[in-house]
Structures are given as structure tokens and as C-alpha cells.
Image (cartoon, rainbow, N blue to C red):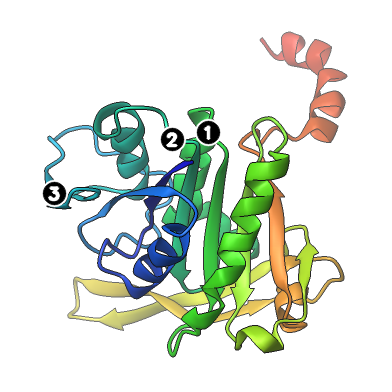
Amino acid sequence: MVILLTNDDGIRADGLQALKRELEAMADVWVVAPDGERSATSHALTLRRPLKIKKLSEKEISVEGTPTDCVILGVNGILAEKPDMVVSGLNHGPNLGDDVFYSGTVAAAMEGTFLGIPSVAFSIVARQDFEFGNVSICGRLIQLIRERGLPKDTFLNVNIPNVPLDQVQGVKVTVLGKRIYRQITSEKVNSEESSYSIGGELGWESRSGTDFNAIEEKMVSVTPLHPDLTDYEALESLKRMESDFRRVR
């Protein structure tokens, strides 16, 4: 099995290196990852400048670009053959609920899905003092994906509690929860200009069956995601309004 490994924390990030060591026991691992941190870049592409790459070793290539750039270059330019799986992570921090829309880690897995490759994103739910000893969970899940496959156009978003392996309470398949962002602060510079920073506290809504609640219970959260963002319930409702739309014209 050939795995293309990437992330959004940068090629030298401890999480990526820990995951690389775990995966090398079961697969031929190629690392194509950003040359530095690209957190919260979502599905950004670099289109108006060349992408510089640097070969750090035979199978480790850094890219002066985004996680999505890395997957596209890895699949269509660097690897001789299409990989069997795209793995993104292990992210330094959670990707829960609405985080997935901002995450470069999750976007890399989505790009793998666009390219027809089974893909999974891994994140550890902490901001510091990461418990990388439980990275073996990633290896077990990848083995299961390899054996059983994934539904068409579906990829997995996996969040792992930051506790020792023997304290992990199991695995739960979840839905995305609701993130609460309290994030904009302003600092006045002078009478004409202000600078803004985006950050602050992150909260979440407690609801049974969500990724947040699974992590709260010290369980690994596995959320199946799909790139099709169509709201099919709204679609049916709006179709009934088509005649009204025509009258507006």
C-alpha cells in the first residue's frame, strides 16, 4: 500500500512525523507537505505563482504552498503512481464541528477524495503537550479502511482525545457538532486605522452523537464527510418556487 501523507502544520511538525513512523510499519509512505505552517488555509490553491519544492529525503518533499497544493502535486506530479490512500495529519489541535470548513488538514483529505482516492484526516484534540503515544489508533483505523473501503466520495474526519492510549474509551461514529466562535478583537492604532486579530475562546454546543461529545467522553470521533454541500431538503422546497422565480424575471 502506498500512502501520500500531508498536513497543514508543516513538514517538520511532530504530529506528522509521529504519524509517518506509525504508517511506515504498514505502507510505503511518501510525505508531501507544506514547508511551514498553513493552518486554517481551508481548500486554498496557489494559482498565480510557481510552487517551489525541496527534496528533504527520497520520500519527503516540502512544498511552498497549501495542503491542497501538496495533494495535487503529490498525486499528479511527484509520485510515479496514484497512491492507495491520502492521509492528512496528525493535526496539532482539534478539527471538530464547524472547524472543518477552515481546516487545511481536512481540505487535504477532501482533495484526495476529489482525485478518487480514499482519504482520512487525523487531529489530536489539544493545543499543547500532545499525547502522540496514541498515534497507533491512526494505524488501526487505516488498516480497517484498507480492508473495508469507504463509500463513494466519502472521506473521514478523525479526532483523537489527548489522553494516554489506555485511557481512550473507544471509537464512536459521529456527526459534526456546532462550534461557537468568540473570536474577533480590535486594537486601535490611531484615529484613521485599526488592526484586528482573529482568535479568542472556542466553545461548542453539547448534543448527543456529535464529535464534540465523543471527545468529551474520551472517545475517538470518526465523522464521515462528503464534498457535496447541496441542501437537498431546501432544494425540493426551492423547486416548488421555480415558477415564482420565472415571474421575477
User: Which SS class for mark 2?
Assistant: loop
Residue 156: percent from left, percent from top: 63, 50
Q: Which residue is mark 1?
A: 117
Residue found 50% across the figure and 54% down from its top: 26
Badge 1: how crowded within 10 Å, few (<14), some, or many (20+)? many
Q: Residue furthest front?
A: 25
User: Which SS class for mark 3?
Assistant: strand
Give the quadrant of residue 53. Answer: top left
Amino acid type for the residue under numbered disc 3: Lys
Badge 3: how crowded within 10 Å, few (<14), some, or many (20+)? few
Whether pointer 2 and pointer 1 mark residues with C-beta atoms closer than 8 Å, the reply is yes
Give the quadrant of residue 68. Answer: top left
Q: Nearer the viewer, residue 241 or 137?
A: 137
Q: In the picture, which quadrant includes the C terminus?
A: top right
Q: Which mark is residue 249?
A: none
Mark 1 or mark 2, which is nearer the start of the sequence? 2
Q: Which residue is mark 3?
A: 55
Whether pointer 3 and pointer 2 mark residues with C-beta atoms closer than 8 Å, the reply is no
226 vs 170: above or below: above
Amino acid type for the residue under numbered disc 1: Ile
